[in-house]
C-alpha cells in the first residue's frame, strides 16, 4: 500500500509503483494517489489532497478524516505486506499507527521536513516506521541518534530530467518557435496555489511582453491543473510537459516547491516566489525556522537564487529579477554554476529503483524476472 498525500508525492508513488511492477509483475499495489499512480497500476482508494497552508488545511479536515478512515479500513481488510508513506506527515503518521497496531511494516519514503520545524517528530517517526528513505543527504543526520535505519536514496525528480535534443528541438516539439527565447512561469500545481499565483504571473507576463516582445512566455501545468483567468494570446499554456518547458527556457519564475529542484536540475536560472493566506504566513513564520525556503538554496546552504515571499512576491519584483537573469551575463553565469552543484549531489542516484529494493528487503520477496 502506498499513501501519497499530495501532487509531488503522488509522482514519486507512480515512479515507485513502476519499479515495483517491473520486479514483481503480479504484486497488487493500492493506496492514496492520483492519475499518475493509477496509470502505473495502483488501485486508488482515495485521491490526493490539493491544499497547502495551515488555515487552508483546517478547512478540509472533514475530507482528511474520511480519507484516513478509508485508508485504515483498507489496511485492516487487505493487510498489505508493507505500507509505504510518502511525506504528508500529519496524515501519514496517523495511518502509521494503524499499521503498527496491525503488525504491518512501514517504510517512510520522503522524510517530513523535520529540519524546518517540529524536530521533536523524529522520535515519533522512529517509533512508527521500520525504514526511512530520504531525498537529501543532510537529512540522514537527523535520524542518526535513533534506531531507525535511514538511507539517502536521491530525489525522484532527477529520474524525470532526461530530455534529449537541443533547446531548439525541444521548443519545436512543444509547438514553440525554435529561434525565439522562452521564459517559463510556474504557478504551482494545487488549486489554491494557482488561484493565489495566477494574477501575479499574469502581470509578470505583461511586463515581460512589454520589455521583451520577442520572448515566448510559457505557463507549464500538470495534466490535472486548471487556470481560472483568461490569458492574453502571447502566453502559451503547456500541460504535462513541465520538464521540457523548463529545459528550453532562458529563465523561469517558480512557485516554491519541488518545481524549483526540477528547474535547477535542468540548469535553468530562476527566481522563486510564493504566497499563502496572511494568517497561514504569520503562523508559518512563528513555527518554521529556516534561512531559506527553496530546495535549491537549502541544498546549497547559501542563496543561489532569489526568494520572494508573501508581500515581496509582487509582479514588479519577480519581473525585475527575471530581467536581471536575462540581461546580466555575469549574474546569470554565477547562478548556473550554483545550479550545477545541485545536479552533482543527485548524480548516479536511482531513488525509485532503490526504494523498490528496500521493499524487497523488508518483505523478503524474491526477484524472479528482473535485477536491481
Image (cartoon, grey):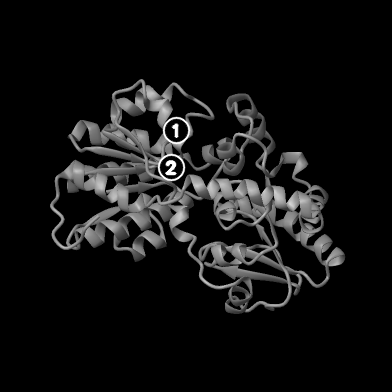
Q: Relative to residue 337, is residue 127 drawn left or right?
A: left
Measured along the vertical axis of the image, is residue 178 above or below residue 22? Answer: below
The quarter of the image holding the C terminus is bottom left
Q: Residue at x 17, y 62 (%)?
A: 26
Pointer 1 residue: 139
Q: Which residue is more in the foreground, 102 or 222? A: 222
Q: Are marks 2 and 1 in contact (CB under 8 Å)?
A: yes
Q: Position of residue 312 (x, y in %)?
A: 77, 41
- Is residue 344 visible in this depiction of the protein? yes
Under tag 2, what secondary structure? loop
Q: Residue at x 65, y 41 (%)?
A: 276
Pointer 1: residues within 10 angstroms few (<14), some, or many (20+)? many
| Real-space CA distance between mark 2 and mark 1, rounded to the nearest whole angstrom | 8 Å
Residue 329 quadrant: bottom right
Pointer 2 residue: 135
Measured along the vertical axis of the image, is residue 176 above or below residue 311? Answer: below
Under tag 1, what secondary structure? helix
- Is residue 43 visible in this depiction of the protein? no
Q: Which residue is more in the foreground, 70 or 212? A: 212
Q: Relative to residue 147, is residue 52 drawn left or right?
A: right
Q: Position of residue 136 (x, y in %)?
A: 46, 39
Q: Position of residue 14 (x, y in %)?
A: 37, 57
Q: Relative to residue 209, is residue 198 drawn left or right?
A: left
Q: Residue at x 80, y 52 (%)?
A: 324
Pointer 2: residues within 10 angstroms few (<14), some, or many (20+)? some
Q: Position of residue 302 (x, y in %)?
A: 64, 35
Q: Residue at x 57, y 58 (%)?
A: 266
Amino acid at each position: 500500500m502506498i499513501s501519497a498525500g499530495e501532487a509531488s508525492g503522488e509522482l514519486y508513488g507512480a515512479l515507485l509503483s513502476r519499479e515495483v511492477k517491473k520486479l514483481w509483475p503480479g504484486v497488487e499495489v493500492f493506496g492514496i494517489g492520483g492519475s499518475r499512480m493509477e496509470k502505473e497500476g495502483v488501485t486508488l482508494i482515495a485521491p490526493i489532497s490539493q491544499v497547502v497552508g495551515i488555515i487552508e488545511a483546517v478547512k478540509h479536515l472533514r475530507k482528511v478524516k474520511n480519507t484516513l478512515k478509508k485508508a485504515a479500513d483498507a489496511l485492516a481488510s487487505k493487510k498489505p505486506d508493507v505500507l509505504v508513506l510518502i511525506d504528508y506527515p500529519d496524515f501519514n503518521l496517523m495511518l502509521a499507527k494503524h499499521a503498527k497496531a496491525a503488525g504491518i511494516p512501514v517504510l517512510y519514503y520522503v522524510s517530513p521536513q523535520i529540519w524546518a520545524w517540529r524536530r521533536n517528530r523524529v522520535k515519533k517517526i522512529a517509533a512508527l516506521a521500520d525504514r526511512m528513505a530520504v531525498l537529501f543527504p543532510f537529512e540522514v543526520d537527523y535520524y542518526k541518534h535513533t534506531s531507525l535505519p535511514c538511507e539517502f536514496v536521491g530525489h525522484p525528480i532527477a529520474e524525470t530530467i532526461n530530455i534529449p535534443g537541443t533547446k531548439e528541438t525541444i521548443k519545436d516539439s512543444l509547438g514553440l518557435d525554435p529561434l525565439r527565447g522562452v521564459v517559463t512561469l510556474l504557478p504551482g500545481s494545487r488549486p489554491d496555489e494557482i488561484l493565489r499565483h495566477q494574477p501575479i504571473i499574469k502581470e509578470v507576463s505583461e511586463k515581460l511582453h512589454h520589455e521583451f516582445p520577442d520572448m515566448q512566455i510559457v505557463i507549464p501545468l500538470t495534466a490535472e491543473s486548471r487556470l481560472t483567468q483568461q490569458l492574453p494570446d502571447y502566453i502559451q499554456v503547456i500541460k504535462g510537459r513541465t520538464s521540457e518547458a523548463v529545459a528550453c527556457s532562458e529563465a523561469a519564475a517558480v512557485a516554491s516547491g519541488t518545481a524549483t529542484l526540477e528547474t535547477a536540475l535542468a540548469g535553468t536560472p530562476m527566481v522563486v516566489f510564493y504566497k499563502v493566506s496572511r494568517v497561514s504566513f504569520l503562523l508559518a513564520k512563528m513555527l518554521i525556522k529556516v534561512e531559506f525556503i527553496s530546495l535549491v538554496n537549502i541544498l546549497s546552504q547559501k542563496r543561489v537564487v532569489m526568494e520572494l515571499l508573501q508581500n515581496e512576491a509582487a509582479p514588479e519584483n519577480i519581473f525585475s529579477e527575471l530581467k536581471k537573469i536575462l540581461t546580466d551575463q555575469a549574474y546569470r553565469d554565477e547562478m548556473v554554476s550554483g545550479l550545477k552543484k545541485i545536479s552533482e549531489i543527485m548524480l548516479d542516484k536511482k531513488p525509485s529503483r532503490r526504494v523498490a529494493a528496500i521493499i524487497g528487503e523488508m518483505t523478503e520477496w524474491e526477484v524472479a524476472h528482473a535485477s536491481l
